[in-house]
Image: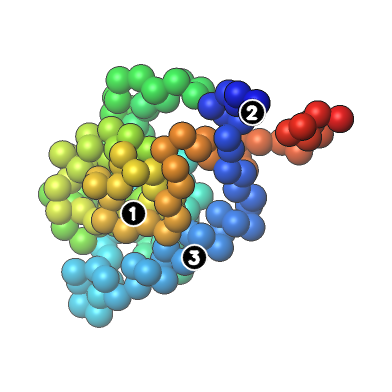
Amino acid sequence: MIERLPHEKGFHISWDQIHRDSRALAWRLEQQGPLAGGAWKAVVAITRGGMVPACIIARELNVRVVDTISVKSYDNQTQEATEVLKSPDPVMMGDGEGVLVIDDLVDSGKTLEVVRALYPKAHFATVYAKPKGRPMVDSFITEVSQDTWIFFPWDMALQYVEPYRGV
């Protein structure tokens, strides 16, 4: 058996797939908000990965207030200490009630743990989830194994790849 590097056990997501999966998450969240008619007062994207899904979800759910929280927990493929670089409008956020916080992926859950501590009443949703991070997320679409590296379309370029068993 060939030993693989961690990044070689990859789950490659196309632009079409992230769009479909983000829409599926929006459908799951429809009518789930605490406001009249199940609406949400705002969508907050965890940057940078949550921005694309948050835009799609905000459009699907007709949420016009969209903001970001910038949290750094990775340097390339290495996890670091989590740091909040920018927070959303504090008046809008309050304790998070009625706010939908979106990220592309929950991995270890450390990023969401930090954001959840700031906004304990927000609803946390990710498109993809790994087992260690699942307890930190309220809604998600697809679970992948903890040792799978997800390659998002904004991180990739098309190029030739050697077959697993060589040429």
The residue type indicated by label 1 comes to Ala
Question: Mark 1 falls on what kind of element?
Answer: strand
Q: Residue at x 37, y 65 (%)?
A: 63
Q: Earlier in the sequence, mark 2 or mark 3?
A: 2
Query: Image quarter for residue 97?
Result: bottom left
Place of residue 125 in the rendered image (x, y in percent of width and height, measured from the top left): 33, 54
Please tell me the numbered disc located at residue 84: none
Q: Residue at x 55, y 54 (%)?
A: 18
Looking at the image, is 110 positioned above or below residue 24?
above
Determine the CA span between mark 2 and mark 3: 38 Å
Question: Mark 3 falls on what kind of element?
Answer: helix
Contact? badges 1 and 2 (CB < 8 Å): no
Looking at the image, is 55 positioned above or below residue 152?
below
Place of residue 1 in the rendered image (x, y in percent of width and height, measured from the top left): 64, 28
The residue type indicated by label 3 comes to Arg
Residue 30 in view, yes or no: yes
Is residue 98 shown left or right of residue 25?
left
Report crowding for label 3: few under 14, some 14 to 19, many 20 or more residues within 10 A (C-alpha): many
Looking at the image, is 22 positioned above or below residue 134?
below
Q: Residue at x 60, y 24 (%)?
A: 3
Please tell me the numbered disc located at residue 23: 3
- Disc tally is 3
The residue type indicated by label 2 comes to Met
Provide the residue designation for mark 1.
125
Residue 62 in view, yes or no: no
Place of residue 138 in the rendered image (x, y in percent of width and height, measured from the top left): 26, 56
Provide the residue designation for mark 2.
1
Place of residue 24 in the rendered image (x, y in percent of width and height, measured from the top left): 47, 66
Determine the CA span between mark 3 and mark 1: 12 Å
